[in-house]
Amino acid sequence: MIIEKIAESRFNDSVFESTVFGKEFSDHMLIAHYKDGKWGEATIKPYGPITMTPAAMSFHYGQTIFEGMKAYKNENDDVFIFRPEKNFERFNLSAARLNMPQIPKEIFIDGLKAIVDIDRKWVPQDYGTSLYIRPVMFATEEAVSARSSNEYIFAILLAYAPSYYEKPLSVKIADFYSRAAQGGVGFAKCGGNYAASFFPASEVQKEGYDQIIWTDSIEHKYIEEAGTMNVMVRIGNKLLTAPTSERILNGVTRDSVLTLAKDAGNDLEIRPVEVKELYDAYKSGELKEVFGCGTAVVITQYDTIGFGDERVQLPHLAEEDSFALNLKKKLKDIQYGLVEDPHGWRVKIEKEN
Ligand SMILES: *Cc1c(COP(=O)(O)O)cnc(C)c1O
């Protein structure tokens, strides 16, 4: 790995006063080029623009994938990342599906550790704040023929993630648009999945909702995901979530929350969840909680659910009675290094650079 440090750091304390997610980039970025069938040596260098031709193939055919993870700091200035191997594996699954080259561990994992180490002062310390880590790969070959590119850039960027008041959201259950199809790319973190979701999201926003709960594309009968999160439902004292599939992204937060729920002895069912089942449970008073799981905010509660033209309001549970809030606290405490880490999920970033 080649390391070219910035001459003078751009860091100052006002960075941590930002209230917007992912706009304050750190001093450095990691860049690696793929060409002639192999990856070149990764370089960590000052963050900034790169030059690309408008003919670069990712602009035309969307061969672009990404990951999202975070670095956390505890009171002793220790910096941790959370289950990075999972993101590494998923990145390469996404790459394979988009017919892009696999990224070696020495670039993804070792690069991640090195850049977070170098920019460790950019990791904020307040509970709830973090440094967001964005690995990304895109096609760079100069050609407009519709085929997969022979050249790529892999990059890792770091940006401040503030803590914000996480109010429960209102979500509409999709009854027309779809996020993912059978045999498609729903399980991959590829750019096109998000591009395709913005218009349907803007439509429900006009109706006063924050997000969409996606359903299966064939019948709109089963719950799949919400925004960029996996969805969990609590009916009575049972926690339900859909199995991952080619349509449903295998979230690291989903897996961690399920593990913690299992540890706590919660009643779990991983199976397809019908929209009708949710509606019937609401009618009988058994629908207690619906929430999304993802790296950005760990857990987001949904308190208003739109079934067609009908909007229903979920009960407001006290914090100690909410599965969502309890699981969220448990997971965050592990991520921030405040409690034991029984599953070995935390990876400490050693000071080396
Ligand atoms: C990123 C993402 C998730 C959540 O995955 P995490 O690993 O928990 O961050 C869920 N669904 C979609 C569609 C996503 O893009």
Image: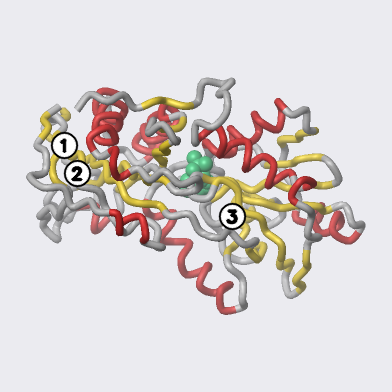
The residue at which mark 2 appears reads as 28
Quarter of the figure with residue 2: top left
Q: Residue furthest toward the right?
A: 284
**Of the numbered discs in the image, which one, if any, rests on residue 27?**
none
Could you tell me if the residues under marks 1 and 2 are in contact, i.e. CB atoms within 8 Å?
yes
For marks 3 and 2, the one nearer the N-term is 2
Which amino acid is tagged 2?
A: His
Can you give x and y, in whole percent of width and height, for residue 286 in the image? Answer: 87, 52
Residue 25 against residue 135 in the figure, above or below: below
Which amino acid is tagged 1?
A: Ile
Residue at (59% x, 20% y) in the render: 342
The residue at which mark 3 appears reads as 226
Residue at (71% x, 28% y) in the render: 262
Can you give x and y, in whole percent of width and height, for residue 297 in the image? Answer: 53, 50
Q: How is the image coloured?
A: secondary structure
Give the camera-side residue of 182 and 126: 126
Residue 3 against residue 9 in the figure, above or below: above
